[in-house]
Image (spheres, grey):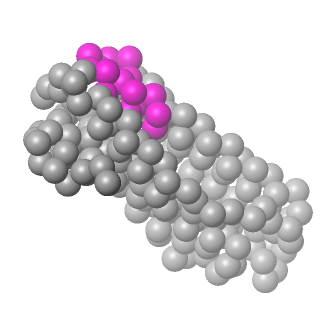
């Protein structure tokens, strides 16, 4: 970071990000517990586990900034969001014969999508505000993860609303 005093300005948004991810995890666990379809339950359980990974990643970044006063930061790494989404869609296709979606699933997916979009917007705003390229890279990682969650939820919505169209667009090679 350009100056050692700048690190304090980075920590507060990370505290907020940590809280967002914890709230997201709880939201997904609650949704998994209240849904009746296997697809929705598995989706929300998957997303809750993803939030755990984000929480851990944010905590490690926070500790690296705080511990070094902004001099040595954890490398954000590379998101494997596209791979996770492809694997999820493969599992989704395997549920074809077990699928029994309903309007409650659609409502839950839409609520989850709003939550994910809000987190993504927050991370984009924070990325635009920061100057340190290492912190920008970290926010970019978070944005890619949240974007994958949004794409996953949109895929589930399409699957529930019109399975025939979903399968047509996700033909296996």
Q: Quadrant of residue 89?
A: top left
Q: Is residue 102 left or right of residue 30?
A: left
Q: Nearer the viewer, residue 110 or 154?
A: 154
Q: Is residue 138 left or right of residue 164?
A: right
Q: Is residue 39 left or right of residue 54?
A: left
Q: Nearer the viewer, residue 3 or 48?
A: 48
Q: Quadrant of residue 30?
A: top left
**What is the magenta segment's predominant secondary structure?**
helix
Q: Residue at x 89, y 63 (%)?
A: 68
Quarter occupied by the C terminus: bottom left
Residue 91 x %, y %: 38, 36
Q: How many marks?
A: 0
Q: Nearer the viewer, residue 20 or 144?
A: 144
Q: Over which residues does the magenta segment extend?
A: 32-47
Residue 95 x %, y %: 29, 29
Residue 6 x %, y %: 75, 73
Residue 121 x %, y %: 40, 62
- The magenta stretch spans residue 43: yes
Using the rendered image of the protein, determine whether residue 115 is visible from the camera's viewpoint. no
Using the rendered image of the protein, determine whether residue 94 is visible from the camera's viewpoint. yes
- The magenta stretch spans residue 138: no
Q: Residue at x 78, y 77 (%)?
A: 1
Residue that lies at the very extreme toward the right in this rendered image: 68
Residue 55, above or below 49: below
Residue 105, above or below 98: below
Q: Residue at x 18, y 47 (%)?
A: 166
Residue 148, above or below 35: below
Q: Is residue 168 left or right of residue 26?
A: left
Residue that lies at the very extreme toward the front in this rendered image: 173
């Amino acid at each position: 970071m350009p100056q050692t005093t700048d690190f304090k300005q980075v920590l507060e948004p990370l505290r907020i990000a940590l809280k967002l991810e914890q709230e997201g995890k709880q939201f997904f666990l609650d949704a998994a517990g209240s849904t009746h379809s296997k697809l929705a339950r598995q989706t929300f359980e998957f997303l809750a586990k993803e939030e755990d990974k984000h929480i851990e990643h944010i905590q490690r970044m926070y500790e690296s900034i705080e511990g070094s006063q902004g001099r040595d930061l954890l490398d954000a790494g590379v998101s494997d969001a596209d791979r996770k989404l492809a694997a999820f869609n493969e599992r989704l296709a395997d549920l074809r014969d077990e699928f029994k979606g309903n309007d409650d699933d659609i409502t839950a997916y839409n609520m989850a999508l709003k939550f994910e979009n809000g987190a993504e917007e927050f991370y984009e705003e924070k990325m635009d505000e920061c100057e340190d390229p290492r912190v920008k890279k970290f926010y970019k990682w978070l944005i890619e993860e949240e974007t994958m969650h949004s794409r996953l939820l949109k895929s589930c919505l399409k699957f529930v609303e019109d399975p025939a169209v979903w399968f047509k667009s996700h033909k296996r090679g």
